[in-house]
Image (cartoon, helix red, strand yellow):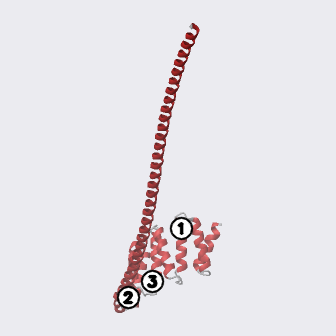
Amino acid sequence: MKLHAALLLGLCFAAGAARAGMFDDEEARRDIATLRGQVTASQKSIEDRLARIETLQQDRSIELSKLIEELKQDIARLRGQIEVQTNQIDTLDRRQKDLYVDLDTRLRKFEAAAQAPEKQAAVSDPAAEAKAYEAALNQFKLGNYQSSVAAFQNFLATSPNSPQVSSAQYWIGNAYYALRDYKTAIAAQQKVLASWPDSAKAPDALLNIASCQAELGEARAARETLQSLLKKYPGTPAAEQAKQRLAGKR
């Protein structure tokens, strides 16, 4: 009997322990399920956040693309406007230049028309021209170079068709040379060469230019002028002087 009781008591304890073990296992499973739910919720939250971030990034990319495209369109429109304005400016500039040319041409015609009656009214007086020329030349011979320049300039203004105009211009250059105003003298003699290249005074004008250049210390330019004199006006007294000067410089 005692043995039987002991066995019963042992079975009761074993059953209680088994029930206690089963209780602990169920609680553990509940805890695991709870943790799994929490992990799943956290994972879902993270995935939702990532999805929202990706969506925002895509939206921003779309917005940036739209902005860039709009900027490109604005730049294209501005370029088109600039091209149009540039063409308009070029057209206005051409019209303005054409207008200036037209006005200048008309003005020259009016000036020519206004001067024509004066030229027709002016009657050539060879005797008076010769007297005025001689008076200006006498001033040069007397050493009154400034007076000579003024007299010859007046002669050119009053007698522009005189056969002595090239000589008068030459003597103006010579007078400035005598006054040591070499640059003005060169300019005066260059006018002789430009306006009357076939005049008898043209070789002398070149010779005088070479003298002015030498006085200014422009030896090379003076030599080139003398060589040009020999080439353009060979056989003239001025050319002979040029030969002598070149020979003396060698």
What residue occupies the far top of the structure in this picture?
Answer: 2
Using the numbered discs, state the Cα–Cα distance from disc 1 to disc 2 in whole angstroms. 36 Å
From the viewer's perspective, is the residue at label 2 or at label 3 nearer? 3
Can you see residue 107? yes
Can you tell which mark lies on residue 128? 2
Of marks 3 and 1, which one's residue comes earlier in the chain?
Answer: 3
Disc 2 residue crowd, few under 14, some 14–19, many 20+, Cα 10 Å: few
- Quadrant where the N terminus sits is top right
Determine whether 25 is above or below 248 in the image.
above
Q: Earlier in the sequence, mark 1 or mark 2?
A: 2
Picture mark count: 3
**Pointers 2 and 3 in contact (CB under 8 A)?**
no
**SS type, badge 1:** helix
| Residue of label 1 | 213
Q: In the image, what residue type sits under mark 3?
A: Val
Q: Percent from the top left, x then y, of residue 38? A: 47, 34
Residue 144 visible to the viewer: no
**Residue ID for mark 3:** 165
* Kind of residue indicated by mark 1: Gln
Which of 99/170 is in front?
Answer: 99
Image mark for residue 161: none
